[in-house]
Image: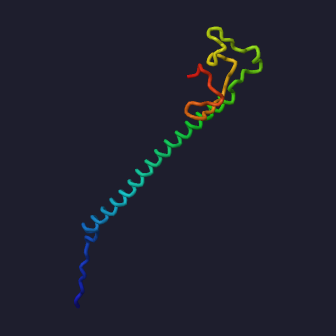
Amino acid sequence: MRQLVIKRNLYSGMTLVEIMIALVLSLVLIGGIITVFIANKATFRSQEGLAQLQENGRMALSILTNDIRNAGYGGCDFQKAIITNTLNNSNNYVWNFTNFIDGFESTSTSAWEPALDVSIS
């Protein structure tokens, strides 16, 4: 009786071509991941800059709003605290400290409503 001898390949595994294909696929995958990471980092920096700009604007408007609302406010005992200008002519508009805030509207390049005082350049 003859026995059939089947040779087995004891060295079964991956070939060099399979390893190279796996390396190329993993490099493509890692390249995509790095590209997404860099794009997200740039977007984050841009959004962070815009957020800081918005916060600075909000803070500036808050300070200006508070100062504008309190323009001309002298406190509870304001009548005793009127400032008298003794260094300059207090009849001059620029040195008149009793008038705290005035509004002027430009009707053209050189005309204002109400008319500007001559001491204002």
The percent position of residue 24, horizontal first and vertical second, equals 30, 62
| Residue at image coords 31%, 64% | 22
Q: Is residue 70 left or right of residue 3?
A: right
Q: How many marks?
A: 0
The percent position of residue 90, horizontal first and vertical second, equals 66, 13
Q: Nearer the viewer, residue 115 or 50?
A: 115
The percent position of residue 114, horizontal first and vertical second, equals 66, 29
| Residue at image coords 58%, 22% | 120
Q: Quadrant of the N terminus?
A: bottom left
The percent position of residue 20, horizontal first and vertical second, equals 27, 64
The structure's colour scheme is rainbow
In this view, 86 is above or below 44:
above
| Residue at image coords 26%, 72% | 10
Place residue 63 in its image quadrant. Answer: top right
Q: Residue furthest left?
A: 2
Q: Is residue 68 left or right of residue 21?
A: right
Q: Residue furthest bottom?
A: 1
Q: Nearer the viewer, residue 83 or 40?
A: 83
In this view, 98 is above or below 31:
above
Q: Nearer the viewer, residue 112 or 58?
A: 112
Place residue 80 in its image quadrant. Answer: top right
Q: Quadrant of the C terminus?
A: top right
Q: Nearer the viewer, residue 39 or 31?
A: 39
Q: Is residue 13 left or right of residue 74?
A: left
Place residue 93 in its image quadrant. Answer: top right
